[in-house]
Amino acid sequence: MTFTEDDLRALLDERTAPAPERATDVTQIVRRGRRMLMIRWGMGAALAGAAALVAFLVVPGQSPNADPIPVAAATPSATPSRTPERQPALTLDGKDRSAALASDKSAVGYDLKLTPKSSDLVVRCEEPGAWVALSFKGGAQKGATARCAGRGTRFELSGKAKSVRVWVFPANAPVVDRPLKDCVLVEKEKGLCDGKYAAAELIRYDVALSLAADLGAQPGSWSAAVYDRP
């Protein structure tokens, strides 16, 4: 409720009439009332301004000229997808599948554990002609590279390696199937042949990782499976 100055004077006159000796200075009270109203008004305006500022900062799109809010770049998951478009077969020529993985992106690599009985590795790609590179850990088998065939690419395993890193890259990746000795411009440390990656050098983890970093995660699902002999 709001009181005018006349209302205040009338109220004070009414309450001080029985005791004139205790009369209150109306002018002084009015001045104090005005100061209190000014203080309250100032606090209200400040709070309203602060609320508006918070709304502007917290709620995107309040200002038509506001800069777009940056979005963190997406990164590929460290774990391959477990719902591939095409599951690897459970058996292969009488051999049981011992390990498998699937990814919905290419230009990525994942590890598969091997056993002493592991004899075959099959990689199937959504994109025909995609590059496949294998790097083995443990044992004498170093690695292999190949183009992914329509029905899958099959690799023979020695049975001595403990694990294998499987990389799959797009068919149009900057890769040449040519040994470094046949290249005009050779960068052995980077595994480059005339400015492109030599396919045979992709068995090196650092080279495959460099190509993956250059490309970033790309579309193209694929799966890989290890089969053990009985």
Image (cartoon, helix red, strand yellow):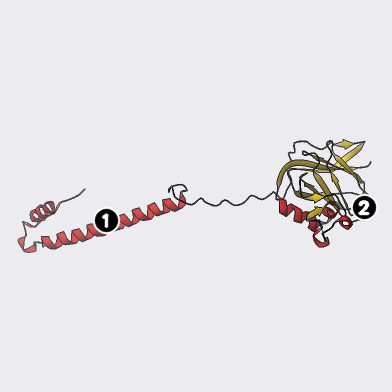
**Number of residues whose C-alpha sits closer than 10 Å to that of mark 2, classed few (under 14), some (14–19) or many (20 or more):** some
**Number of residues whose C-alpha sits closer than 10 Å to that of mark 1, classed few (under 14), some (14–19) or many (20 or more):** few
User: Going from the N terminus, do you reach mark 1 or mark 2 first?
Assistant: 1
Q: Please give the name of the residue rendered at 66% of the width and 50% of the height, measured from the top-left corner.
A: 75
Residue 88 percent location from the top left of the image? 82, 38
For label 2, the SS is loop
Left or right, residue 109 beside residue 118:
left
- Give the residue number, with chain letter if any, for mark 2: 160
Q: How many marks?
A: 2
Q: Is residue 47 above or below residue 147?
A: below
The foreground one among 167 and 112 is 167
Residue 101 percent location from the top left of the image? 79, 43
Q: Please give the name of the residue rendered at 84% of the width and 58% of the height, measured from the top-left corner.
A: 184
Left or right, residue 137 beside residue 72:
right
Indicate which disc residue 98 carries. Answer: none
The foreground one among 130 and 94 is 130
Q: Please give the name of the residue rendered at 16% of the width and 61% of the height, measured from the top-left corner.
A: 31
Q: Is residue 227 above or below residue 20?
A: above
Residue 16 percent location from the top left of the image? 8, 57
Indicate which disc residue 41 carries. Answer: 1
The foreground one among 84 and 173 is 173
Give the residue furthest to the front. 184
Which amino acid, mark 1? Trp
Which amino acid, mark 2? Lys
For label 1, the SS is helix
Left or right, residue 53 beside residue 88:
left
Residue 2 percent location from the top left of the image? 20, 49
Marks 1 and 2, how far apart at CA? 83 Å
The image quarter in which residue 125 lies: top right
